[in-house]
Image (spheres, rainbow, N blue to C red):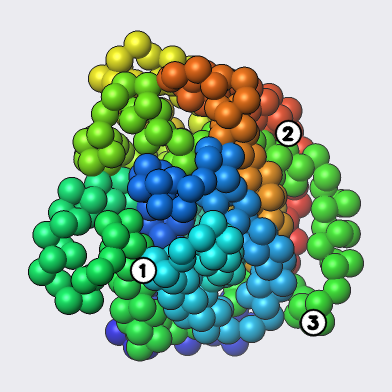
């Protein structure tokens, strides 16, 4: 599948879109890359017990490993990589990022101290910083605006697959650790947590080769002016022209992501500490429940946004993200405070139906209000905010509250519950306030690109 099949456009007409079958193949590759990125990013969360024992770290330090260590480079490099995405071959950037974060994940297995693991996690963030700007830009040029939300919904499925795989596979590998280390030469002498990092990172190297051989760069659609240089003036002017629309979309969805990263980083600890489950049991349960429900929700999110759009709701992305925020307030908080692990798992399952609506809203929303030649940069700015605020805060605040305020046995549930209620409510309020401005921005951008 090396060629992108297109029809030759008539003179003066817009270029045809790539063949739909090939476009979906590219989405499949991007979705798998996203799944591996999330797997490599969050597999550490189920390794809290062996890592704390091996490296002598506390909850606050573990929160930094999950959040700040990853988000520093992931955020700082987001805008430069977004500019590169808007000005160069996106597939090449994707291959480089995929290779780097996979090797860095394997490198986590070599860490013998907290600073060494912190450095390895930073390199994972460097590689993953390229994925979302590149993928969202590629999808926008493989699918027309009507079909685009569905493609984004499938792409978001990668985060669900990755999170579920991180929980399920980490639990599986931990339970198999002794036999794996004893029978497979490459793992001989490793601790169980080291084997998990190696197994999580290796598939990304294979996928990088597949992308190199089969994914081609598409023609850019709707480019009004060619982007040159690396000036921040165009992106500043764009945000200044529609501050409420971009502000509501970015701030509201980032507040939702604080809750999402708290789920990924600390929900395993909730079941282990508050309900007495083993790490393996926790991994199996969260994976078995989360993967099918979140996968359904990821695909469904794109269809829901497309359905709302067809019914005249051009602000459909903000509606979907608002529902996600309200779900965090209700089901997220209840899941934390539940009296038993079974009830907590049920609340986790219901909340999972709406979690991925938020990220589909980001991708669809940016494609509606940002010009083609600046979509990578806008997505990169969202990535910066999600890294510096959501990823860092979602992990650090829970760990800090657990160490300082809710430091009694099982106090993790109150620390998590506070984050879900406060940030979910703030997200819903911000998103609802920006719907009118978003509608105006979407109409103006549509008229601009149709000229």
Note whether residue 228 is visible: yes
Q: Secondary structure at mark 1?
A: helix
Residue that label 2 marks: 434
Q: Are marks 3 and 1 in contact (CB under 8 Å)?
A: no
User: Nearest the camera: 142 or 66?
Assistant: 66
Question: Marks 3 and 2, how far apart in space?
Answer: 31 Å
Q: Residues within 10 Å of mark 2 (few under 14, many from 20)?
A: many
Q: Choose mark 3 or mark 1, whichever is in front.
A: 1
Q: Secondary structure at mark 2?
A: loop
Which mark sits nearer the N-terminus, 3 or 1?
1
Q: Left or right of 303: which side holds 126?
A: right
Question: Marks 3 and 1, how far apart in space?
Answer: 35 Å
The image quarter in which residue 214 lies: bottom left
Q: Residues within 10 Å of mark 3 (few under 14, many from 20)?
A: few
Residue that label 3 marks: 228
Residue that label 1 marks: 201
Q: Left or right of 138: which side holds 44?
A: left
Q: Are marks 2 and 1 in contact (CB under 8 Å)?
A: no
Residue lying at 33% horizontally and 51% vertically, measured from the top left: 166
Q: Is residue 141 above or below residue 381?
A: below
- The image quadrant where one finds the C terminus is bottom right
Question: Marks 2 and 1, how far apart in space?
Answer: 40 Å
Where is residue 101? Give x, y as percent. Answer: 48, 70
Q: Secondary structure at mark 3?
A: loop
Which mark sits nearer the N-terminus, 3 or 2?
3
Residue lying at 86% horizontally and 59% vertically, measured from the top left: 236
Q: Left or right of 111: which side holds 400?
A: right
- The image quadrant where one finds the N terminus is bottom left
> Residue 255, labelled with which disc?
none
């Amino acid at each position: 599948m090396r060629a992108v099949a297109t029809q030759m456009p008539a003179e003066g007409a817009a270029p045809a879109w790539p063949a739909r079958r090939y476009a979906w193949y590219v989405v499949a590759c991007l979705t798998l890359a996203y799944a591996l990125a999330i797997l490599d990013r969050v597999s550490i969360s189920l390794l809290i017990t062996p890592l704390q024992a091996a490296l002598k770290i506390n909850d606050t330090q573990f929160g930094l490993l999950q959040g700040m260590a990853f988000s520093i480079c992931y955020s700082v490099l987001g805008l430069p990589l977004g500019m590169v995405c808007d000005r160069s071959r996106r597939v090449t950037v994707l291959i480089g990022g995929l290779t780097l974060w996979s090797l860095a994940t394997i490198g986590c297995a070599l860490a013998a101290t907290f600073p060494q693991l912190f450095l390895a996690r930073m390199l994972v963030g460097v590689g993953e910083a390229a994925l979302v700007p590149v993928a969202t830009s590629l999808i926008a040029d493989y699918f027309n605006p009507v079909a685009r939300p569905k493609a984004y919904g499938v792409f978001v499925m990668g985060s669900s697959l990755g999170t579920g795989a991180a929980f399920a596979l980490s639990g599986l590998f931990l339970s198999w650790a002794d036999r794996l280390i004893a029978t497979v030469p490459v793992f001989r002498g490793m601790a169980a947590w080291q084997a998990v990092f190696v197994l999580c990172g290796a598939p990304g190297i294979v996928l990088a080769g597949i992308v190199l051989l089969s994914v081609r760069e598409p023609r850019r659609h709707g480019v009004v002016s060619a982007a040159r240089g690396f000036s921040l003036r165009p992106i500043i002017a764009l945000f200044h022209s529609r501050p409420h629309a971009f502000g509501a979309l970015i701030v509201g969805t980032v507040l939702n992501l604080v809750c999402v990263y708290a789920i990924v980083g600390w929900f395993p600890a909730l079941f282990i500490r508050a309900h007495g489950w083993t790490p393996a049991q926790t991994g199996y349960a969260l994976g078995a429940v989360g993967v099918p429900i979140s996968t359904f929700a990821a695909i469904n999110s794109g269809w829901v946004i497309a359905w709302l759009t067809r019914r005249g709701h051009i602000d459909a992305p903000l509606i979907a993200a608002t529902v996600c925020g309200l779900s965090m307030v209700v089901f997220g908080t209840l899941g934390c405070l539940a009296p038993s692990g079974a009830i907590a798992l049920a609340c986790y399952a219901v909340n999972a139906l709406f979690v991925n609506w938020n990220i589909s809203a980001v991708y669809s929303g940016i494609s509606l209000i940002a010009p083609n030649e600046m979509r990578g940069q806008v997505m990169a700015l969202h990535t910066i905010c999600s890294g510096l605020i959501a990823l860092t805060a979602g992990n650090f605040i829970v760990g800090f509250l657990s160490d300082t305020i809710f430091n009694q046995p099982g106090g993790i549930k109150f620390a998590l519950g506070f984050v879900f209620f406060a940030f979910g409510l703030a997200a819903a309020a911000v998103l609802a306030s920006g719907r009118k401005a978003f509608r105006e921005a979407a109409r103006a951008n549509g008229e601009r690109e149709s000229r």
